């Protein structure tokens, strides 16, 4: 079905961004920021309207123009909205709009506010391009574009060299993943082209996927998954996300929690028809997802920076989503993506509110007792923490249980996968409530000066927090288990994942038992956090100094993975680059070019002696040649 | 008895003298004269063949050559005069301005 206003959804933020680039300085901070927010609000309104109009199982299309035409390969710049895209649209524009509003307050004192909104709008444009693309190439453009915006925003405060380095790291690590992603796309095109089908269109791909051999599909999906691990921060490419917290907090909430990092999940779900044909890739995805969820959660246990805890928690939750994808529960993965967007955005923005109140302080050891000073932040943070920990009837409870249930009962799942996810759920509850108690309860541990300045955030920020907190509860009610009012979520996505969706056959009683177990370990995590951090206690220090503190240090330093990569990859690569720059390039490359030049010059120095400039010499040569030719032809007769 | 070969050998000798003059002499006027010598050596050869083969074609060509030689002499002498006016010398070895 053709709906020709779809194009305005990405276009409006792009236009606003362009206007702000060229006229932002003239408009002034207030007007520029207002324009940016209005643009995203307009996109959100269109998204809502499209969502309202979209019949179940239908697809809206809007073809703008033909981008590439080469032989029988035709790539159109064209947008599509189906049930899956509609969900992503609501998340991107809805959460995006809220975070724009929040930024009005958060970035209000920053001199680079206009630049900030330019980047933010540009990000919304590329993200919409990514989720609305109806072929792989447009998706790839969006994919690279959000990476660029992520880089720009991580290094937003570029005066601090640390931030630019973090931006570089994010960009370079993503580049590795993108390389795999691009290879995957190229492999699809050439392999299908070999069968006479030249296309990048999702719809066409799905139709012709059976032409590919299983080995090729496995290779393609593995390459695509490499791209997903980069963008969605999975083992082994997750190292950039914690450092990405150098950016402003709204950016962490929007890009590095709610939207961009879920692009890998979205891409895998979008191409589910490929992935289901590659069981080996699926099981690898499940294992990597579970492992990432587990390890990131252990690292989060020991962090002291308020945003780093949330960063590792994001990595861990993304791991859950990949676990769900890996066991074939695509719908559950998207459901967790949806609920996670609410509570993680709420957590990040809450953390931003705390940082704002403490004038840039991020170390949780210098916080405490903020409940009295920041009541709104406190309550919203509590709701979001409950949601991510899986407290009953919150959004996280339903989506996480759904994933764990699929991990256990799906034909691709296993008890081991469930066990890892279950342990992670316990740790999640522990580290989140540890953070909660450290920040909001007890006595304030910072300086007197800081204490005097604590203030609740402006209305624009707290309002957004409240909306997101409400979402953290109710977003999950769309997908409740059968023993409540049933799942409204799966039927909505059924037309897309229909063939792929593995109906979980199992007794409801077993599902209840698993849910009780998950609740139990979540509760245990909460109780332990309360014992260790909710009251005055020496327990945390005692645990930290176990085994001479080695254990704690390993977790705190993220298993020394950064150092490991530094030794294994970064340094050899730097040495190699330096060798290239200082030896290979000047000696070999330049040497070759110079040798050609020198040889030519030497040769011509000899031969130019022939050209004496004397006409009579030339004539003599002319004569000699004529005689020689004459003799030759006469000799032939 | 004067045979064809005698004429041809005489033509070749005059031609060779002309060639050596063109290549070795250091005065442009003499070089020009040597060229005339070469042309006339060729003319001689044409005439000889014409006579011995009983054909008029050779004589026709000779008229052409003589006409061209006249024109060539005019232009050549004009160039030589203008060169001499510029350089006060007619030595071809000194005319090397175009050498790189």
Image: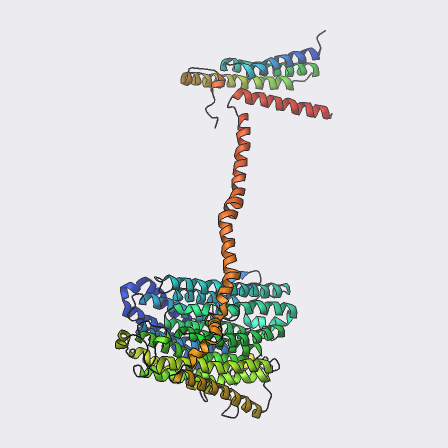
Position of B57 relative to A323 (above/below):
above
Instruction: Locate residue A62, reporting x and y percent.
Output: 47, 72
Position of B29 relative to A241 (above/below):
above
Res. A251 in view:
yes
Residue that protrudes farthest toward the top in the picture: B1
Instruction: Locate residue A38, reporting x and y percent.
Output: 33, 73
B56 relative to A141 in the view: left or right:
right
Q: Nearer the viewer, residue A29 or A339?
A: A339
Position of A196 relative to A500 (above/below):
above
Res. A57 in view:
no
Q: Quadrant of residue A537?
A: bottom left
Q: Nearer the viewer, residue A140 or A223?
A: A223
A144 relative to B45 in the view: left or right:
left
Residue that protrudes farthest toward the front in the picture: A548
Position of A398 relative to A38 (above/below):
below
Q: Nearer the viewer, residue A4 or A98?
A: A98
Instruction: Locate residue A239, reporting x and y percent.
Output: 48, 68
Instruction: Locate residue A421, reporting x and y percent.
Output: 53, 81
Q: Nearer the viewer, residue A66 or A351?
A: A351
């Amino acid at each position: 079905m053709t709906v020709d206003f779809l194009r305005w959804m990405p276009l409006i933020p792009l236009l606003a961004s362009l206007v702000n680039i060229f006229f932002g300085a003239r408009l002034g901070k207030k007007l520029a920021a207002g324009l940016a927010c209005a643009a995203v609000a307009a996109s959100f309104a269109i998204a809502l309207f499209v969502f309202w109009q979209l019949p179940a199982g239908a697809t809206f299309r809007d073809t703008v123009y033909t981008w590439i035409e080469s032989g029988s390969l035709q790539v159109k710049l064209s947008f599509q909205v189906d049930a899956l895209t509609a969900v992503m649209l609501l998340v991107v524009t809805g959460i995006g709009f809220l975070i724009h509003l929040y930024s009005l307050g958060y970035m209000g004192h920053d001199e680079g506010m206009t630049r900030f909104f330019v980047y933010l709008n540009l990000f919304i444009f590329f993200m919409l391009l990514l989720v609305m693309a109806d072929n792989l190439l447009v998706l790839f453009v969006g994919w690279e574009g959000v990476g660029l915006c992520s880089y720009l925003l991580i290094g937003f405060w570029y005066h601090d060299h640390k931030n630019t380095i973090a931006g570089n790291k994010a960009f370079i690590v993503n580049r590795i993943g993108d390389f795999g992603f691009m290879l995957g796309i190229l492999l699809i095109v050439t392999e299908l082209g070999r069968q006479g089908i030249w296309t990048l269109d999702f719809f066409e791909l799905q139709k012709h996927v059976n032409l590919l051999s299983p080995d090729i599909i496995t290779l393609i999906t593995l390459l695509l998954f490499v791209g997903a691990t980069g963008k969605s921060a999975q083992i082994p490419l997750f190292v950039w996300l914690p450092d990405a917290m150098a950016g402003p907090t709204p950016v962490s909430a929007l890009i590095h929690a709610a939207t961009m990092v879920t692009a890998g999940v979205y891409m895998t779900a979008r191409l589910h028809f490929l992935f289901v044909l590659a069981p080996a890739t699926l099981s690898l995805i499940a294992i990597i997802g579970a492992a990432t969820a587990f390890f990131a959660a252990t690292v989060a246990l020991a962090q002291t920076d308020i945003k780093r805890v949330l960063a590792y928690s994001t990595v861990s939750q993304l791991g859950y989503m990949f676990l769900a994808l890996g066991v074939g529960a695509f719908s559950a993965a998207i459901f967790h993506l949806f609920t996670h967007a609410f509570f993680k955005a709420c957590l990040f923005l809450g953390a931003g509110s705390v940082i704002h109140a403490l004038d840039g302080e991020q170390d949780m050891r210098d916080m405490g007792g903020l409940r009295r000073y920041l009541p709104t932040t406190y309550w919203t943070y509590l709701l979001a923490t409950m949601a991510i920990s899986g407290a009953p009837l919150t959004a996280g409870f339903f989506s996480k249980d759904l994933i764990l249930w699929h991990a256990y009962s799906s034909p691709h799942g296993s008890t081991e996968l469930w066990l890892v996810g279950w342990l992670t759920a316990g740790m999640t509850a522990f580290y989140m409530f540890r953070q909660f108690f450290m920040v909001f309860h007890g006595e304030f541990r910072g300086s007197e000066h800081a204490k005097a300045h604590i203030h609740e955030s402006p209305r624009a920020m707290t309002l957004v927090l409240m909306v997101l907190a409400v979402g953290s509860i109710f977003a999950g009610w769309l997908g409740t288990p059968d023993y409540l009012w049933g799942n409204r979520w799966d039927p909505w996505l059924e037309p897309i994942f229909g063939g792929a969706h593995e109906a979980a056959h199992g007794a409801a009683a077993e599902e209840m038992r698993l849910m009780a177990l998950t609740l139990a370990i979540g509760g245990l995590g909460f109780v332990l956090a309360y014992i260790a951090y909710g009251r005055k206690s020496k327990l945390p220090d005692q645990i930290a100094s176990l085994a001479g503190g080695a254990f704690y240090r390993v977790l705190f330093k993220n298993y020394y993975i950064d150092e490991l990569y530094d030794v294994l990859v970064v340094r050899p690569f730097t040495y190699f680059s330096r060798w290239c720059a200082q030896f290979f390039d000047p000696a070999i490359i330049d040497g070759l070019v110079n040798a050609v030049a020198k040889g030519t010059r030497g040769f011509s120095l000899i031969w130019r002696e022939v050209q004496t400039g004397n006409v009579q010499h030339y004539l003599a040569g002319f004569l000699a040649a004529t005689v020689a030719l004459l003799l030759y032809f006469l000799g032939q007769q | 008895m004067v045979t064809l070969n005698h004429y041809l050998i005489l033509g070749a000798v005059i031609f060779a003298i002309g060639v050596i003059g063109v290549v070795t002499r250091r005065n442009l006027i003499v070089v020009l004269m040597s060229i005339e010598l070469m042309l006339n050596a060729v003319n001689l050869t044409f005439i000889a063949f014409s006579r011995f083969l009983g054909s008029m074609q050779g004589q026709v060509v000779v008229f052409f050559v003589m006409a061209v030689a006249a024109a060539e002499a005019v232009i050549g002498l004009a160039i030589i005069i203008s060169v001499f006016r510029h350089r006060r010398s007619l030595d071809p070895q000194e005319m090397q301005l175009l050498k790189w």
